[in-house]
Amino acid sequence: RDARLSSARRSRLNLFVARAAQSPHTWQHMTMRLSAATRSLSSILAASLARDARAFSAVPILRARAANRSRPLASTRSGGARSVSDFTTSELKRLLSERGIDFRDCLEKSELVERLQSALRGDQPSDSSALAALGEGERSVVQLFQRVSPSVAFIQTSTVRAAGPLSLRGEVVPQGSGSGFVWDDEGHVVTNYHVIRNAADADVTLLDGSNKIVRKAELRGVDPDKDVAVLRVRDVPKKTLRPVTVGASKNLRVGASVFAVGNPFGLDHTLTQGIVSAVGREVQGVAGRPIKGCVQTDAAINPGNSGGPLLDAKGRLVGVNTAIYSPSGASAGIGFAIPVDTVRRIVNQLIRYGRMLRPSMGISVADDQMTRGLADRLGKPLEGVLVMEAPPNTPGGEAGLVGCMRKGGQLYLGDLITEVSWSRRESNL
């Protein structure tokens, strides 16, 4: 505004300020000599300074939260802004929480008031300043957890059992707990099959800011061979569904940093850190079949971590925690995760079809030991895969494959598969 004044008025204003600084008692006398425009400017500046002073010494009137945003919190009877001591204990705690100030050590209201006044003066560090005080490596880990924790689910299962030996009434009892993670914005949650096996009901807990949302889950599909299951939760706000970022496991290298987020022993949203100890491990699945290509890690994985995500340093999903090797049942630094490249293929089919669709010939074949024994008895090599059974209602049987047969105590060998190609063959093997 000073730039808009004429040079004469600017000179008078500068002279006025200089004299007022030397002798404050001349303020009123000098004001009478200014023109009306200059007095108006002085009034505006004085009012602005007064408002700034009030804003610094008192907490501004706050608006109520979403339930009653249109109604401001009560003000003082004089109509001015409320001082810090006028707020209730719950309001003080809310104000401190909104500013990221820890108040758990405050036992009295006066301590809360002092903590808030200190925060208004800038003496108390906020979350942002506390984060800036960390090292670069620590800061990246904290930011990773803040980013991925809303994607992690806490799963609690229950089952139904008889209320008594002679009772026909069933009662719902807790069965166990595990972890999972949000796969997409349609409410699909991925976990381990053994987490929900034999469960009658499952509750999924998700984070919504500082609140928790609990929903009943419905089973979408399972693959026991790979220990993968897909649940679905409904009636969850879109903003709460934070799908995990899916990475790739084929590029993992031993020594790379990984992070496990889960609910060990029911302690929800726990972060542990480690490295990739080995790749390509084979783990026995709950269905009795081996799961190949698993990732071994020394990140602490305990009961309750099953089904949770294993993440790389950028927070991308690289595996699903599924098993540990431990004589005691707790973490011994040897954990295993199903590679995400396998999980992606399975989950997409379970979501689309509700089950796994695997190509199969429907035939049974002899193992290598049996084939070598038959070759020794025949006195000539059997180089290939010997078909033992080929039922007529299977793809192999419909293609013309013939299995081994016994007639009159004699064993008649079936077809021997010596080559597989995508070209069409006009004759049997």
Image (spheres, helix red, strand yellow):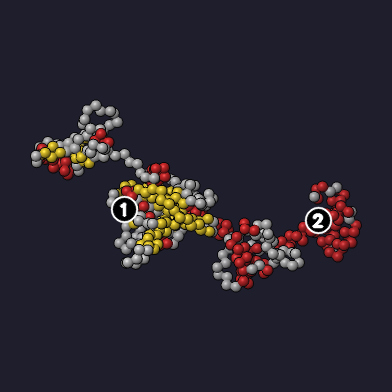
Q: Of all residues shown, which one is farthest toward the right?
A: 33
Drawn side of residue 369 relative to residue 188, left or right: left
Q: Residue 44 carries which label?
A: 2
Q: Please, what is the three-letter code of the amino acid marked with disc 1?
A: Val
* Image position, residue 301 (x, y; %): 38, 58
The front one of 160 and 95 is: 160
Q: Is residue 256 visible?
A: no
* Image position, residue 96 (x, y; %): 60, 63
The front one of 74 and 330 is: 74
**Dot 2 or dot 1, earlier in sequence:** 2
The mark tally for this picture is 2
Neighbours of disc 1 within 10 Å: few (<14), some (14-19), many (20+): some
Judge whether 415 appears above or below 194 on screen: above
Secondary structure under tag 1 reads loop
At a point 51% along the width and 52% down the height, the residue shown is 236
Q: Residue 108 appears in which quarter of the rendering? A: bottom right
Query: What residue does disc 1 label?
Result: 286
At a point 71% along the width and 65% down the height, the residue shown is 75
At a point 53% along the width and 51% down the height, the residue shown is 237
Q: Please, what is the three-letter code of the amino acid marked with disc 2?
A: Ile
Secondary structure under tag 2 reads helix
Drawn side of residue 34 relative to residue 343, left or right: right
Q: Where, quadrant-wise, is the C terminus in this rendering?
A: top left
Q: Residue 353 carries which label?
A: none
